[in-house]
Amino acid sequence: EDSWTCGTCSAGCPTCGGSFKTCSSSSGGDPFAHFGNHSVQYWPPFETRITLLEAGGMKLHGVVQDRRPDTNNRWFGKFILSSDDVDIVRARVVPGQALLSQEEEAGGVIDTLLVEAKLDGGWQNVTSQSNHLILDGQAVLDFETRKNKFGKGRKQALVIKSPHMNVTIESAKAQKFPDEFRQLKYLHLDMKVDGLSKEKAITGVLPQIWGLVPMTPTVEAMLKKPESEAAPNVL
């Protein structure tokens, strides 16, 4: 029987009293949900906000970009973090084609991941402004620019730590293509779950796909490729 691979977490986030588990799980690609030794492809609706993960009033939502007719791939282009149903963080990918033509900015690299946080009641662009930001004790944000080159930019990541969940959101190339033009044209976001509170009920699309909670008809429908094509990929 396949299981969700978990262990003890030592993340440097707001104190959780040792209630975290680290998890070998993620969502990315076309998209695929990875857990343990398995990868399951699923088909979320285009341009629809879906709740991927919920624990203790903290929710992570994702939105799949509609890039038809160029491609039917369902890459995530935006993630939203909410606390008690109030949005507090928004992360979105930049248009990838721009990375092929722009020059690097004098002070650094071109951003591939744009981040906004709700501060003092309003939304503020916090992309690259600070490597470390605390949101009223609800979450800690760490912004990282990595060595991987993305045209004139670089791979970037947002690490979110909270009392209920830890996740990492990254800009990602479309590696299924051999040429850099299409890899950047279809730049998107991947997400990895680094930890979840074992003290809180866990719900959302991903826990249902992982087999942690019963699956609803809505999520079950996401496991079926549209237009009566082949069944989902299980690797």
Image: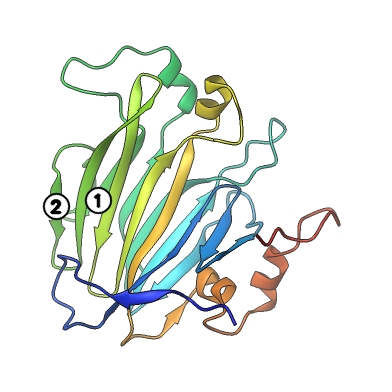
Q: How are the residues colored? A: rainbow
Residue furthest to the right in view is: 228
Task: Please tell me the numbered disc located at residue 133.
Answer: 2
Task: Please tell me the numbered disc located at residue 55.
Answer: none
* Circle 1 residue: 117
Q: Is residue 134 left or right of residue 180?
A: left
What residue do we see at 15% from left, 37% from top? Answer: 129
Q: Is residue 165 left or right of residue 49?
A: left
| Residues under numbered marks 1 and 2 in contact, where contact means CB atoms less than 8 Å apart | yes
What residue do we see at 61% from left, 30% from top? Answer: 177
What residue do we see at 13% from left, 58% from top? Answer: 134
The image position of residue 80, as x and y in percent, is 39, 56
Three-letter amino acid code at the position of disc 1: Ala
SS label for mark 2: strand
Closer-to-camera residue (132/18): 18
10 Å crowding of disc 2: few (<14), some (14-19), many (20+): some
The image position of residue 217, as x and y in percent, is 70, 76
Three-letter amino acid code at the position of disc 2: Leu
